[in-house]
Amino acid sequence: MTARSTAGPAIRVRGLEKSYGKLEVLRGVDFDVAPGTVFALLGSNGSGKSTTVRILATLLKPDAGTAANGFDVTTQPANVRESFSLTGQFAAVGDILSGRENLLLVAKLLHLDDPGTMVDDLLDRFSLTAPGTGATTPAPSCG
């Protein structure tokens, strides 16, 4: 469990709107993400999940509203891109790298200090290691 920061949310979205012509994709989306939490956007196809993520990643500009993760996505896009990491549901190396190796790759790409220790701590924090071994639990088969 993570204590809630008094500094406010890690991500704050208020009144987010996006349309493509007459098609309103987002209409007044509001949410906060507390620091140190895992957050997921859930919804049916066409509900605006990908559009919201694209706005948060500065790949798409909103028509209205604000989205910030310490920096405003519209006015400070370079700062936003330096401050977070994003992964989709599919990865090009998903069948090649283990979960630990994938996390280690991202940590190294971000030039984080002591990436191996950081990855091991994350795996332990989320109970993703085999009991008593410290080894990562194999991913479930999708076949």
Image (cartoon, rainbow, N blue to C red):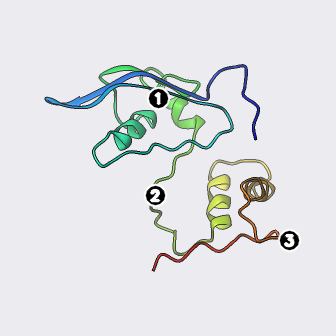
Q: Quadrant of residue 50?
A: top left
Q: Of residues 108 and 27, which is closer to you in this image?
A: 27
Q: Is residue 107 left or right of residue 117?
A: left
Label 2 and label 3: CA atoms lie apart by 29 Å
Q: Which residue is mark 1?
A: 77
Element assignment for label 3: loop
Type of amino acid at the residue the image marks with label 1: Pro
Within-10-Å neighbours for mark 3: few <14, some 14–19, many 20+: few
Which residue position is annotated with label 2?
89
* Element on which disc 1 rests: helix
Which quadrant: the N terminus? top right
- Earlier along the polypeptide chain: callout 2 or callout 1? 1
Residue at point 75% right, 66% down?
Answer: 129
Callout 2 touching callout 3 (CB < 8 Å): no
Q: Can you tell which mark lies on residue 15? A: none
26 vs 43: above or below: above
Quarter of the figure that contains the C terminus: bottom left
Q: Please name the amino acid that badge 3 sits on.
A: Gly
Asked if marks 2 and 1 touch (Cβ < 8 Å), the reply is no
Q: Return the x and y of residue 26 as percentages of the image width and height.
A: 31, 30
